[in-house]
């Protein structure tokens, strides 16, 4: 006579499933803050790189075409705003009449839409645009862009444009970083 062992039912019991879901919920709650910080870091880096690319495009075009080119903040992606806050977007245009304001007949070379919520870019006080000369140099004194996000002032970075028009990364002063973070608390236009 042959003996067979009874088959154990396959699958999960309700208690086993509840334990697995509880363990999963604990893991998700531990990983969520780190994932949120990763997203904020990526959005800030992407925004910084987009601005750096716009500045390089303007400088290259100015030197390559022997033209005056301006990069300025713009919420409507058509005309310059009179602000040091760049998170609402910016434009690049040929400044044929050299007045640092875009006229309808001046060519628009590029435009950026508003940055993701929670990212801010603030330029040096009083610097509401970057003017590139036909040789690729920038007019005025150095301008610093402080880029920050919801992670706070310690995570802020900068892009600095020197008089030769070159862009370099850097670390903001505590006051500049705090000023940038304060923009995050202001309502968006």
Image: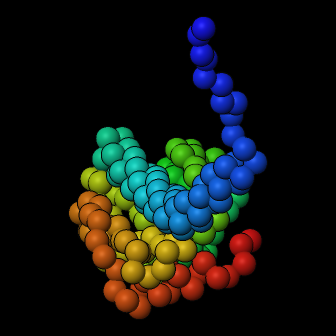
In which image quadrant can residue 55 be found?
bottom left
The answer to whether residue 178 is visible is yes
Q: Is residue 184 above or below residue 178?
A: above
Q: Position of residue 179 (x, y in %)?
A: 50, 87
The extreme front residue here reads 1
In the rendered structure, the answer to whether residue 164 lies left or right of residue 102 reads left
Q: Is residue 158 above or below residue 68?
A: below
The extreme bottom residue here reads 175
Count of numbered circles on the image: 0
In the rendered structure, the answer to whether residue 48 lies left or right of residue 35 reads left
In the rendered structure, the answer to whether residue 65 lies left or right of residue 3 reads left
Q: Which residue does the image show at 70% across and 30% down from the upper left?
A: 9
Q: Which residue does the image show at 29% across and 61% down from the upper left?
A: 167
Q: Position of residue 35 (x, y in %)?
A: 52, 60
Image quadrant occupied by the N terminus: top right
Image quadrant occupied by the C terminus: bottom right
Q: Which residue does the image show at 51% across and 52% down from the upper left?
A: 92
Q: Is residue 150 above or below residue 65?
A: below
The answer to which of 101 and 173 lies nearer the viewer is 173
In which image quadrant can residue 164 be found?
bottom left
Q: Position of residue 96 (x, y in %)?
A: 50, 52
Q: Which residue does the image show at 41% across and 91% down from the upper left?
A: 175
The answer to whether residue 100 is visible is no
């Amino acid at each position: 006579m042959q003996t067979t062992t009874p088959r154990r039912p396959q699958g999960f019991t309700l208690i086993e499933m509840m334990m697995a879901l509880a363990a999963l919920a604990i893991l998700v709650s531990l990983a969520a803050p780190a994932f949120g910080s990763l997203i904020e870091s990526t959005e800030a880096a992407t925004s910084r790189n987009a601005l750096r690319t716009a500045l390089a495009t303007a400088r290259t075009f100015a030197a390559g075409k022997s033209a005056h080119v301006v990069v300025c903040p713009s919420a409507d992606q058509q005309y310059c705003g009179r602000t040091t806050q760049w998170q609402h977007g910016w434009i690049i245009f040929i400044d044929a009449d050299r007045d640092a304001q875009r006229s309808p007949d001046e060519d628009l070379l590029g435009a950026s839409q508003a940055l993701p919520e929670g990212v801010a870019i603030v330029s040096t006080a009083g610097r509401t645009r970057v003017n590139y000369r036909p040789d690729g140099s920038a007019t005025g004194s150095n301008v610093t862009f402080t880029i920050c996000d919801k992670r706070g002032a310690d995570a802020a970075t900068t892009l600095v444009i020197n008089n030769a028009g070159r862009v370099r990364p850097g670390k903001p002063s505590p006051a500049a970083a705090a000023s940038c973070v304060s923009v995050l608390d202001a309502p968006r236009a």
